[in-house]
Amino acid sequence: MTEMRLRRLGESDLASLAALEAEQPHPWSAGQLREALRDPVACVFGGEVGEALVAHAVVARLPFEAELQALLVASAWRRRGAAVRLLAAVIEQARGWGSERLLLEGRADNVAALALYRRAGFVEDGRRPRYYPPLAPDGEREDAVLMSLALG
């Protein structure tokens, strides 16, 4: 992989972040992204190759835990280690906050993401049946897999 540089994103990165997010079937809106960038208890990490934003992750601090709210890698950059590096940065941030656990939820059919989380030590805590809207117009709602990583 061409070297990806990780850094914390700010409001000046909103346009790049929104463009990356627009690749998704159900992207976050520019308003949601702006709120994440402004939130004093959240951290938005970006992965850049050259001047291009190719990945991002959003983690929020909760009273005793942290929550991975989003992790996205541009399709052209998947399977090159970007998600592993972003997840490591998120885990380090959560530990730095003194969080006891890092929580996340993912689509049940996102096999690659769930495998990444399991390799990082996350365990499945439960499911939310039919939580996610369908990806295709004629599709069915999908379960959310709830996972956590103990940080203690």
Image: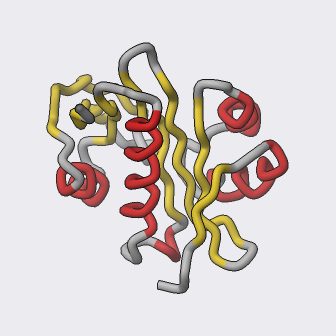
- The picture places residue 74, in percent across and down from the top left corner, at 54, 66
Residue 62: tell me if it is visible.
yes
Return the residue nearer the eye: 137 or 148: 148
- The picture places residue 77, in percent across and down from the top left corner, at 50, 74
Q: Is residue 37 left or right of residue 127?
A: right
- The picture places residue 52, in percent across and down from the top left corner, at 70, 71
Question: Residue at point 26% right, 23% down?
Answer: 128
The quadrant holding residue 81 is bottom left
Residue 141: tell me if it is visible.
no
Return the residue nearer the eye: 45 or 32: 45
Q: Is residue 130 left or right of residue 97?
A: left
The quadrant holding residue 146 is top left
Q: Is residue 92 left or right of residue 101?
A: right
Q: Residue furthest top?
A: 63
Question: Residue at point 37% right, 17% down?
Answer: 64
Question: Residue at point 46% right, 57% down?
Answer: 86
Report the coloring of the rendering.
secondary structure
- The picture places residue 7, in percent across and down from the top left corner, at 63, 57
Q: Is residue 90 left or right of residue 129?
A: right
Residue 33 versus residue 128 in the image, above or below: below
Q: Residue furthest right?
A: 12
Q: Quadrant of the C terminus?
A: top left
